[in-house]
Image: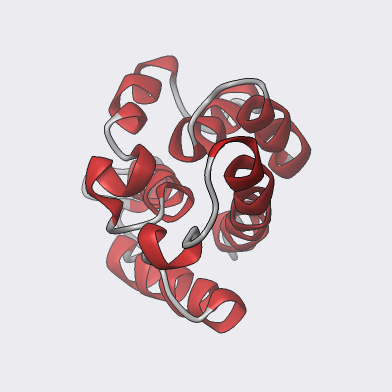
Amino acid sequence: MIKDRAIQYFMSGYSCSECIVQACIDEGICENSLLPCATTFSGGMSSGCACGSVTGSQLVLGYLFGRGNKFGNTISAREKAGEFVEEFKKRNKVTCCRILSAGFSGSERKNHCTKFVSDACDILEELMKVKV
């Protein structure tokens, strides 16, 4: 289960996007080389747009289900990406970091955003299940 590990990383200084990718690396889901790619997705890609929990999860989904993927192109990465966003919006209404974290700063924001990391991990774990 990646959620507990991701939250530990998040609370210890990793960004929202990095903590999800690092938890997946720890579980053998993806390679170490993916972590630096997640860094630029934090803080809504440094602009406040897409939540880093969402973009970090999308990075993992692309790694697993994208072109030339681990599962042999039988599963659509874009379909998985759409399912992820739809479920995240059901739980949180939006995917925009600026809106999700409005009114929070510092450690208060970090604590608030733990919910989004948690939700993203739950959704990601469900979507990573490959039905054969």
How many numbered discs?
0
21 relative to 28 in the view: left or right: left
- Identify the image quadrant of the N terminus: top right
Q: Considering depth in this image, is 13 or 104 the residue closer to the camera?
A: 104
For the point 48% across and 64% down, the residue is 100
- The picture places residue 24, in percent across and down from the top left corner, at 57, 33
Q: Is residue 47 left or right of residue 1?
A: left
Instruction: Report whether 6 appears left or right of 20.
Output: right
Residue 98 quadrant: bottom left
Question: Is 32 in front, or is 130?
Answer: 32
Q: Position of residue 37 (x, y in %)?
A: 29, 28
- Tell me which residue sits at (44%, 16%) in the image: 32
Taking the spot 21% from the left edge, 49% from the top edge, the residue there is: 67
Q: Quadrant of residue 115?
A: bottom right
Rendered location of residue 33, percent (x, y): 35, 17
Please determine whether, in this image, residue 90 is positioned above or below residue 88: below
Q: Quadrant of residue 107?
A: top right
The structure residue drawn at horizontal position 40% and vertical position 58%, both measured from the top left corner, is 97
Figure coloring? secondary structure
In the rendered view, would you say 85 is above or below 30?
below
Nearest the viewer among 123 and 129 is 123
Placement of the C terminus among the 4 image quadrants: bottom right
Is 46 in front, or is 41?
A: 46
